[in-house]
Image: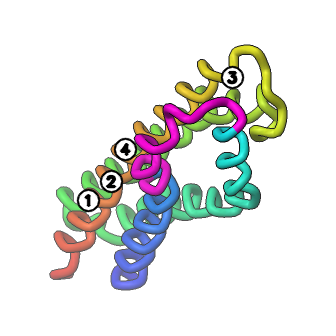
């Protein structure tokens, strides 16, 4: 079980990093776009909600890895810290990203405060890129640490 737990903890945490990292890398090209162009660009994310399944899978996989590695206290801590980062990601999403999505009907409605919502949306994804990079590194470290069992 430990090999499988290590594999899926790293896999799902890495997959959960892809979307926020993509948002981070495109931020500098999008943040200054005029309103009409920004809303056109935002339409490319239709269907990206499905990528969100990797977050609960990463959370679960890291918790399962912590259980599988329970004889190695350091591996357990690393895995639980990776899981905690996923929780932080979800918290940022539900308190900052999702409200911007809701206020704009997933970027199909252009409210007066669209620029503030854009800033909130873009930087919440940037923060989540950092959080998920940390989670990925912790998942790898936990997996490497427990590889000797």
Q: Is mark 4 on a helix, strand or loop?
A: helix
First to last magenta residue range: 21-36
Residue at x 42%, y 47% (from the top left corner) = 24
User: SS for tag 1?
Assistant: helix
Residue 54 falls within the magenta-colored stretch: no
Q: Is mark 2 on a helix, strand or loop?
A: helix
The residue carrying mark 4 is: 131
Question: If the image is split into quadrants, where does the C terminus sit?
Answer: bottom left
Foreground of the two, 79 or 12: 12
Farthest residue, direction top: 112
Q: On the image, numbered disc 3 is attached to which residue?
A: 114
Quadrant location of residue 84?
top left
Camera-side mark, 1 or 3: 3
- Identify the image quadrant of residue 97: top right
Q: Is residue 36 above or below residue 137?
A: above
Q: Is residue 67 left or right of residue 42?
A: left
Mark drawn on residue 133: 2
Q: Is residue 5 above or below residue 36?
A: below
């Amino acid at each position: 079980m430990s090999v499988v737990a290590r594999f899926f903890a790293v896999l799902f945490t890495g997959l959960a990093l892809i979307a926020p990292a993509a948002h981070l890398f495109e931020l500098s090209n999008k943040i200054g776009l005029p309103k009409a162009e920004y809303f056109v660009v935002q339409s490319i994310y239709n269907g990206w909600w499905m990528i969100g399944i990797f977050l609960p899978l990463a959370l679960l996989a890291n918790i399962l890895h912590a259980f599988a590695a329970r004889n190695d206290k350091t591996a357990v801590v690393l895995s639980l810290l990776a899981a905690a980062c996923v929780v932080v990601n979800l918290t940022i999403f539900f308190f900052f990203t999702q409200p911007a999505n809701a206020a704009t009907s997933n970027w199909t409605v252009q409210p007066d405060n669209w620029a503030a919502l854009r800033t909130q949306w873009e930087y919440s994804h940037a923060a989540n890129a950092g959080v998920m990079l940390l989670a990925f590194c912790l998942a790898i470290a936990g997996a490497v640490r427990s590889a000797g069992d």
